[in-house]
Image (spheres, rainbow, N blue to C red):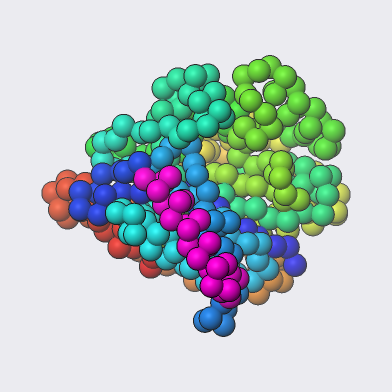
Amino acid sequence: MRTVGVEEELLLVDPDSGDPRAMSAAVLARAARAAGDQEENGTKGDDSDGGEAAGDADDVFEKELHEQMLEFATQPQSSMAELAAEIVRCRAEASRLARETGCEVAALASSPLPVQPSVGMGRRYRWMEEQYGIATREQMVCGCHVHVSVDSDEEGVAVVDRIRPWLSVLTALSANSPFWQGRETGYHSYRSRVWQRWPSAGPTELFATPERYHRRVADMVATGTILDDGMIYFDARLSPRYPTVEIRVSDVCLEPGTPVLIAALVRGLVETAAREWQAGREPVDHSVSLLRLAGWQAARSGLTGELLHPATMRRAPVKTVVRALLDHVGEALADTGDLDRVEASCAELLAHGNGAQVQREVWERTGGNLREVVAECVRRTQG
């Protein structure tokens, strides 16, 4: 069974005002001290509750581009139940560390309140700020990245080619960024629109072979426009560090159960694509232009309007498109035992709304009080 890992980026906010706070260095230092205390006390790696440990705090949490953000990464998991438990543990640990340093964490894909982002220290981040200017300073957005194991680069490229039409549906399901710098944007995933400002971001053409994929990456790095292959921000890419395909189209999700749904769907897409490749089925050759339109439509509508159907690239009701995705990956989900869980989670999202809809509901109920929006998101981040 393919393993799955999730990376989530969280926003650090003031516990009283909800304003983003540049506290990531302090939180990471606290995590390192906590890990050192564990090692000194002989408890490092101990898991007293009987579940699988998510890892030491200094290994789990990482700095991000902006000092108002904190990232964590799960261990690879085969079981969605174990992945769900680890995400809950990581979010709870992030919350504890943040409170000990005077802030809170919120699973917000963009800040509802105005903020002056602080770019982190380090050569890489400073190069990005100099190279990309305001685009770097405005990239204080939080995503959810899913890694799924593949057997080889050949299989990985076959997967990347075949999952392209379906990725916009994941953006719609995960949408959690309707506000930007104190304003209602009219989008459900404004994060995804901001992310597209990177020169290497977005959908890709068909690659067909690992050689063509790696040649394209090498050519992009050789332009000097990006620093290295870590800045290849394709919607789906071969991870430069792990034997995985990495999918990067989702907002960080408000409720901790939603990234588990996204991860299960991504694994289903990867497995379905690998089976199609093994069976000799060619990928659908939608143009990059159409895929960009599908991504835009998903960001605009979320789960409240129409999406572009992955098969036809024509407008269709959200429920129809989500049903098409479930049918597409149904066999793979059934084989891993995830089908019932995914069906139930999708039904729940469609009935009660994703993070963007929750944020808008609070905003409307409180007469446009964005501080209440942040407070509600802090409460919901741990479930």
Q: Is residue 360 visible?
A: no
219 or 289: nearer the viewer: 219
Residue 177 place in picture, x, y as percent:
37, 44
Is 25 contained in the magenta span? yes
Residue located at (48% from left, 62% from top): 34
Q: Which secondary structure type mostly characterizes the magenta part of the structure?
A: helix
Left or right for 209, reference 245:
right
Q: Which residues are magenta?
A: 23-46
Is 321 rendered above or below residue 66?
A: below
Is 133 contained in the magenta span? no
- Tell me the quadrant of the picture where the N terminus can be found: bottom right
Is 22 rendered above or below residue 220?
A: below
- Tell me the quadrant of the picture where the C terminus can be found: bottom left
210 or 324: nearer the viewer: 210
Residue located at (37% from left, 56% from top): 98
Residue 263 place in picture, x, y as percent:
58, 59
Left or right for 154, reference 290:
right
136 or 307: nearer the viewer: 136
Residue 233 place in picture, x, y as percent:
60, 35
267 or 205: nearer the viewer: 267
